[in-house]
Amino acid sequence: MTSKSLKKLPITKLQQSQHQGNKTPLLASLFLTAFASTGTSVIWNGLPFIAKRDYSFSEIQNLSLYLFIGVVYVIGAMTSSRVVRALHSLLSTRSMVAVILLVESIACSLPLFFHAPWVIWCAGGVAGICSAWLWPIVESYLVAGRHGPDMRRAIGWWNLSWMIAVAGVMFAMAPMMERHASMVIVALGGMNLLAICVLPWYGKNPGVHEVEKVREHVPPSYKKLLRGVRVLLPMSYVINGVFTPLLPYVLMNLAVDIFWQTPLTAIWMVA
């Protein structure tokens, strides 16, 4: 996929009055994205392996889990803009990012205290809705104040950062799968806390994205491309949501050792 959201958040008067600088430092965006994308990776690619190994989920249970996460994610994506608008009188956009990451970290800590199937449902659901609210905001910070080649270059580096993080986590979790699979979820909480540490380099709100400059750099074909993305991106989630929950059982039937299952799953990400 080329984007984690279907639309950017609108520019409000509060955004225009409170932003600090017009562009968020690219390195800050890349580091926050890399840290926070570890959770996205495990939710969309690694959770079925953890559910099977430590919680004895069947194929039907894994598919049900992903259906639940998918519904939660869609609800979160559809409400993200309204949630941000509603909270703007109380919190800056940067504070919202911190709260989202903190809530996800707390949910990820549950395996430390409980060992029951509801833990993975709760962690998956919270991570799903937090992900749906987080990425439109992060993308707004990334592109605000950038246009033309500068924006395309930033988006290119940004896509590389989250893709490397997503694939890297699938390799990194392999040594933990035999005896400590659920602790992978706990580790995600730590990565989200690291992402919070990057926020001092963010402005209180995304910079203003000048409409006139957008018109200068966006070709007429952009609208058609956007319509295509609005179809292809949801379809990619549907395919991933159906295929991924079954992978642990497919690889087990192929006699793949548990250590190699998540790295094999990550191969397509680095191909």
Image (cartoon, grey):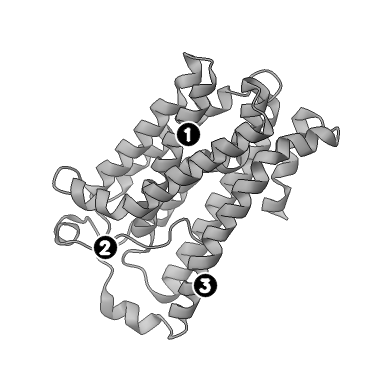
Q: Are marks 3 and 2 in contact (CB under 8 Å)?
A: no
Residue for point 59% across, 47% down: 241
Q: Residues within 10 Å of mark 1 (few under 14, many from 20)?
A: many
Mark-to-mark CA distance, 3 and 2: 21 Å
Q: Residues within 10 Å of mark 2 (few under 14, many from 20)?
A: few
Q: Which mark is residue 10?
A: 2
Image x and y of residue 23, in percent: 31, 61
Image x and y of residue 150, in percent: 43, 70
- Going by the numbered disc 2, the residue's amino acid type is Pro
Q: Earlier in the sequence, mark 1 or mark 2?
A: 2
Left-right relation of 266 to 120:
right
* The N terminus lies in quadrant: bottom right
| Mark 3 lies on residue | 228
The secondary element bearing badge 3 is classed as: helix
Mark-to-mark CA distance, 1 and 3: 33 Å
| Mark 1 lies on residue | 191
Query: Does residue 1 appear anywhere in the picture?
Result: no
Q: Earlier in the sequence, mark 3 or mark 2?
A: 2
Image position of 33 with respect to 197: above or below? below
Foreground mark, 1 or 3?
A: 3
- Going by the numbered disc 1, the residue's amino acid type is Met
Q: Which mark is residue 136?
A: none
Residue for point 58% across, 53% down: 238
